[in-house]
Image (cartoon, rainbow, N blue to C red):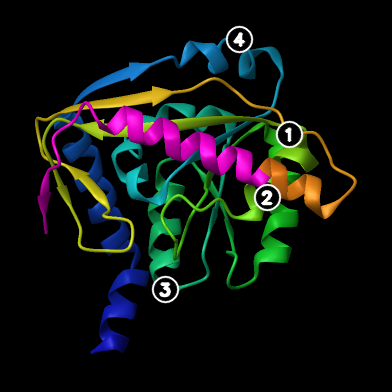
Amino acid sequence: MALKINTLLSSRLTQWVVYIFIRIYSATLRLDVQNEGAWLDAYLKKGERILLCAHHQQFFAAIGYFQKYKGYKPGLMISQSKDGEFISGVAHKTGWSTVRGSSSRGGREALKAMIAHLIEHRLGAHIIDGPRGPFGGVKPGAIKLAQSADAMVVPFYIGADRAWYARSWDRFLIPKPFSRVVLRFEKGLRFKPTDTHEAFEDQRRELERLMMATNTSFQAQFSPGEGI
């Protein structure tokens, strides 16, 4: 059974079906995008490098909208798991380039490739606490990426007035069709290279605290949603 599921996930036809479904599903959402110009117009379009950062819980609702950035050939690091292979296939169809690896497998090589991609193409995204959590815990890769590519970190958050939440480690967020979804970008942050591990950890914890606190405040305006 596991072999059949893995074969299905790696099928190009399956990836196309899911991609088309996401396009249709995303079109039903009443999307409210906030503060995008603060980084897109003020920095990326003027030659700066940008690393968009989010919690694993919230990235799904952004997939359809983020296709608008495909002209920049943005990059995204995705795990080497079978699930990651499937997600990578769908991401390619939205115009995103993927680098395979995570904190648990193939991370060092993938990080180098992601840094090179970000330096060349100037736009990337990073799931700060994926693929296994804990929720909100910033992995070192986010800071290393920003430092090495001299990129501005732009956190973003997603909330929905009607949503389902999976019974998973991150309570994965799936907005209900026709719900109001807010995609909010926050102020960009810069993390300069550090001389010591302690200074590096200070930066990692700073991003972790900031994103957790901002997310808590942001999510307070939305209903708890339903478990699935």
Check residue 191 in the rendering and tell me which mark sits there, or answer none.
1
Question: Which quadrant is the N terminus positioned in?
Answer: bottom left
202 relative to 168, above or below: above
Numbered range of the magenta stretch: 204-228
| Distance between the alpha carbons at the discs numbered 4 and 2 | 23 Å
> Quarter of the image holding residue 11?
bottom left
| Distance between the alpha carbons at the discs numbered 4 and 3 | 38 Å
| Residue matched to label 2 | 114
| Residue matched to label 3 | 82
Which amino acid, by three-letter code, is at mark 3? Lys
- Characterize the magenta stretch by its predominant secondary structure: helix
**Residue 144 appears left or right of 59:** right
| Distance between the alpha carbons at the discs numbered 4 and 1 | 18 Å
**Residue 12 appears left or right of 81:** left
| Residue matched to label 4 | 42
Label 2 residue SS: helix
